[in-house]
Amino acid sequence: MLWVDKYRPRQLDDLIIHQDIGDSLKKLVSTGDCPHLLFYGPPGAGKKTLIIGLLREIYGAPVEKIKVETKPWKIELPNRNIEIELTTVQSNYHVEMNPSDVGNQDRYIVQEVIKDMCRNRPLELKGQRGYKVLLLNEVDRLSREAQHSLRRTMEKYSATCRLVFSCSNVSKVIDPLRSRCLCVRVPGPTGAEVQQVLQHVADKENLQLPDALRQRVVQMSERNLRRALLSLETCRVTQYPFTDNQPVQLPDWEMYIQEIASFILQEQSPKRLYEVRGKLYELLVNCLPAELIMRTLAVQLSRKVDDELRHKTIELAAFYEHRLQEGQKAIYHLEAFVAKFMSEYKSWSIAVLG
Amino acid sequence: MSRKRRQVVLLLSSDEEAQEPRKAPPDTPARKRKETPKRVEQKAYAKSASTPLSQDERRGTLPLQLSQPKEKEATMQRQLDFQPVQRTLDSYAVKSDSHNVLQVNDMGTSSRFRGYGSQQGASLPRVSSVTGRQTAWLVSHTPLTSADLVMHKKKIQEIGGWLELQKEPGLKCKAPRLLVLSGPPGCGKSTALHVLAKEMGFDLCEWQPPVPTLWSEHRYHSADGGLQYTSKLDDFETFVAHAKLSSLSLHPSNPSSEAGASQGASQQSQNQQPQQAGVKLVVIDDLPHTAGAEQRARLAAALGALAAAARFPVVIIVTASSTQGGPDDRSSAWHGLHKELQAALNAVGVAQISCNPITDNYAAKALQRVAAAEGMPLSKEQALSIARTAAGDLRSALDMLQLLCTGVQPLPPQPKTRKRKAKASKQAEPELHLPELGHARDVALDPFHAIGKLLYNKRLEDGSETATCRGEEDSLQQSSSGATSFLNHVCTNAAPEAPVHMAVRHRRRPLSFDPEGVWEQSGLDVGTTAGFLHENVLHFLDSEALEDAALLADYFSDVDRVSSHGFVAASGSSSGYAGDMGAAATFAEALAGSVLVRGVLYANAHPAPRRWLPLRKSGWAAAQRGAAANAAQLQSLVWAGGGVALHCVGGSVRAFAASMLPSARCMSAAGWAAASAVLPECWTQLWQGELSEQRCRPVQVVPELSEDQPQPDAIEDFEDIEEVL
C-alpha cells in the first residue's frame, strides 16, 4: 500500500492538518442533523480525507465496509433509450460516484440514477441516522444542465438523503447549488503543514529525513500533500538512505511540458507551432486535465522569459484558460495560447535583439 | 426535319391536351391483341426515357403520356386473359432493349415463354408528330452513337473495354461477370451503356420485376389461391437462381424471329445457336430496396451468387447521391451502395467503374447542340449558366433547357450547317431571350473541395481601391442560403454608408468566392470543418508568418467558444432532454461557421507558395479516443484501487493521472511492488498521430528493494519512461 493511502487519517480525530475543519464537522454531526455539504479546494488538500472522516463520524466504523459496483443504467427518454455505465462505491449508508465521468450524458445520471438512489431511505438500525449520504466527486465538471437538475433533487429528497459534493473549482458550480450547501473551503496545506506531515510519515516509517531534502520535496509539491507524499516515497524507493542533494523526481508530464516550453523558445514559426500541437495531443492522451497543462506551461514559460514578457504571458494564459472552461475542444485554446505567446516572444526578441 | 418546325407546346399545359393521348389509344388494344394475343407488361418508367429508343420511336413519343393508357390496358389484359391460368407474379420479366417483354414463370418451363415481336414498335400508340405535340428533348436527343455521348472519352473506353472482355459467352469468360457502374444521377451511365452495348452487338436486356401485387389484391385472392404476394427482393432472388442454372434460360432469343412456340428448342440449344445476335447483357437498373439488415443480407447473398455464377455479363447501375457518405468514403467507387453490399461484392470480385458528374463545359456544349438542333441557338453564357445550376446532371439540365425554351419562338431555320449557324448567330447576335432561371437546383460541394477552397484562399488578382477596402463586405452581400442569410442581412444593414478605411495590415484582396456559401454547400458541420481546417491550415501559411498563425489560432479558439453549447442559449434554462436546442443552436452554428471560414481566410494573409499538400484529418479525434481508452483503464483502478486502499484520489481519473501515475511509474521502475499494483494494465499512447497500446504493468514484480540502486538521472529516466510508454 502506498504511503498516501497508508497514512491517510481515517477519523476526524486523527487529522494532522485541517484540525479546525475537523472540529467544526464533528460539532455539526453532533447536533444530529447535517446539511448538504460542498467541499472545495485544490487537489491534494484533503477534501476526500475530510469527507471520509465525516462519514465515519456520522455512521461509525461500518461505513468502511464498502463494495464497488459497475452497472449499466437503462434510461428511457421520450424518443430513445440509452444505457449508461456508472461505477459506484457504496456502503450501507452512503453511495459515492463520479457523475462527470459519463461526459455529455451526465444529466441523465442526475435525473434518473441519483433520483432513484435518493428515493430509498436506508434501514434504520438502533438509533442510526435516518438519512443516507450521496457523495458526488468533481461536481465542477458537471454540465450546467446536470447541475440544474441536481438543484431540484436536493430539495425534493432532503428528508432521506444528504448530498456531499467535492470539487476543486467552486466557481464552476452554479450559484443555486452553492447556496443550498454548507460550503467548506479546504485550503491547500501550507509549506509548514506539508513538512509536518512528511515528518510524521518519516517517523512512522523509521526514516531519517534530511532537512534539505524535506524542504525540496515541499517545494516541489506545490502545496499538494498527495504529491508531496508520493514524491517522498519515490525518493525512498530510488535511493535510501537519503542524502541532502538527492534529486526529487518531477512527474513525467511536467518534465515533458518543460521540454515543450524550451522547444517553443527555440524557434517561433508556424511549423514549430504544428509540432507543439502534436506534443500537446500526446499530453492530452494521458488523461491530463487541459487546465493543468495550460497552467504548467504558462509557469514554465514565464520562468524562462524576461520580466517584460512575463506579465503578458500570464495574461494570455489567464485568457485562454477561461476560454478552456467555456469551450469544448481543449486543443484550440492550448494552441492559441502557444501561438500568441510565440508571436509576442518573437516581436519582443526582434525589438530587443534587433 | 418536321420536328424542327413543330410548334412548341408546354408539357401538360391544358386539360384538352392532356386528354388527347387518351383519345388516341382506343385502337391500340385491339391492334395489340390482334398481333400478339399474349400478356404484355409494359411499364413506362420515367427512367425509360433515358434509354435509347428505336428511330421511329424517337419521332414523337411522350412516354409520360403513353404510360397511363398502356398500364391500364396491361392490367385489364392480365385480368381477362391470364387470371385463371397463370400465377404471373411468381415469374419475372426480362425487358429487352426493343421493349419486348418475355415472361418465364418460376418453373422455367418453356410452355409459357412468350416473346413479343419487335414489330411491336409499330403497334405502340404514339402521338403523331403531325399534331404538333412535342416530345421531351431528353428522349428525342438521346445519343445514338458513342461519338455523341456526353462523357469523358476515357470513361467510355473503360466501359467499352469491359464489354469487350464479356464477348465470350457462357462461363468461359475469365473477367468478372459483374460490373457495378456508379455515378451521380444524370451523368449518362445508362445511356452510355445502352449505346455501347448496341454498338458492340450485345443483346441488352433489362431486369425488371413484375408490378408487385398490392396487399389488398393479395387479401382478395389469397382465399382461392389466386395471385400471391411476392416482394421485389423475392423476385430478384428468383432471377438470380435462374441466372445460375443454364437449363433455365432467360434467353429472349431473336425477338423478331421467335414466336412463343419455338421456345423449347431455343432454350436447350442456346449456346449452339450461331445465328444469335450477340451475347446477352443484363442490366439491373434498380436493385430491390432493402430496409433492414436481414434484407440486406439476402440481397448481398443474391448479388454474390450472381457475381460468382452468372452465365452472362451483368451490369448493376448504382446512382450515387450527394447526400450519402461523409468525406471518408468518397473515394470508393461504390458510392451509393450500402456498406454490407459493397463488402459482399468486393468479396466475390467484381469490376467497378464510377462516373463523375458531367463538367459544366461538357454539359454546356451538349445543351448548345440540342438547342441548335431545336432551332434555338444558345449563347455560351446561357448554356453555361443552365449547366451550372444543374450541377453535373445532364438530365436535369436538358429539362431545364426545355422548360426555358418553351414558348420561345424558335429562330427561323437557316439553311446552313450547324457549325456555320453557330458562327452566324454569333455575328448577328440573334439572342434568344430566355426567361430568368427561377429556381436553381441546390448545388452541393464536395467536402474536400470546400475545405480546399478555404485553405487555398484564392483571391481576385487586383481590385480597385474600394474593392480592396471593402472586399470582405462585398462578398458578404452575395446571396447565400440558410441561416447565414440572416447574418448577412444583419451585417449588410450594419455596414456604414461610407467605406471604412482600414489600416493597411487589415486589408485583403477581395475573395473570389463567398465563404459562407462554400461552407454551407459542403454540408459539413462546424466541428468537422474546424477540425479539418485546424489540422491543415498551418501548412498553407508562409513559414515566417507567425503573426498569421497566432491570429488563426485565436480564431479557432473563438469558434470553439461560439459553437460550444450554451453560448447563445447562455446558461439558465435547463432544456430537459437533448435534441431540443432549437433555433439558438442553429444560429450559434451559423455564427461559428461564419467566424471560422472568414477567420481562416482573413488570417491567412501571407500564404505559402501554392503547391500540392495532402489533406489530413484532425488529430483531435485520435487524441480523444486515446484519452477515452486510458480513462477506461484508469476507471477500474481509481475505484477498485488495484488492491491499494480505495479512496486515494477521490475517484477522479484526472487527479489519478496527474499525481499517482507518474510516481507509480517511477517506483514501479525501481521495483516497488505496491506501486506496480496501481499501474494500469495497458496504456494508450499517441505518437506521430498514431495511437498505440502497450502493456505497462510489469509482469514480474520484484518486491525487494535493492539498496544500492544506481541513482537515476532525472532526464534520462524521463526518456526511459517515454520509451516505456
Image: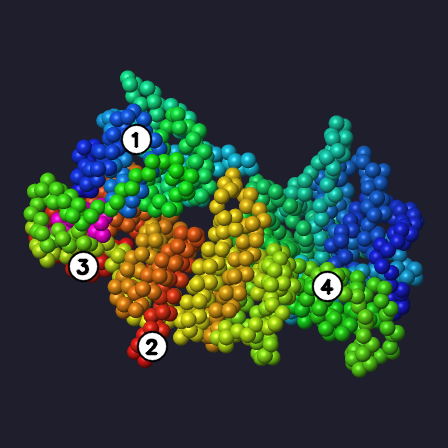
Amino acid on which disc 3 is placed: Ala
Q: Nearer the viewer, mark 1 or mark 4?
A: 1
* Disc with the residue nearer the chain's start (4 vs 3): 4
Viewer-closest of A277 and B155: A277
Amino acid on which disc 2 is placed: Ala
Q: Residue at x 25, y 59 (%)?
A: A255
User: Circle 4 sits in a helix, a strand or a loop, which is it?
Assistant: helix
Label 3, on which residue? Answer: B714
Q: Is residue B445 above or below residue B269?
A: below
Q: Residue at x 26, y 66 (%)?
A: A304
Q: Residue at x 41, y 42 (%)?
A: A175
User: Circle 1 sits in a helix, a strand or a loop, which is it?
Assistant: strand
Question: In this view, which residue lies farthest toward the top?
Answer: A126
Image-based side of B573 in relation to B50, left or right: left
Q: Nearer the viewer, mark 4 or mark 3?
A: 3
Label 2, on which residue? Answer: A351
Chain designation of label 1: A
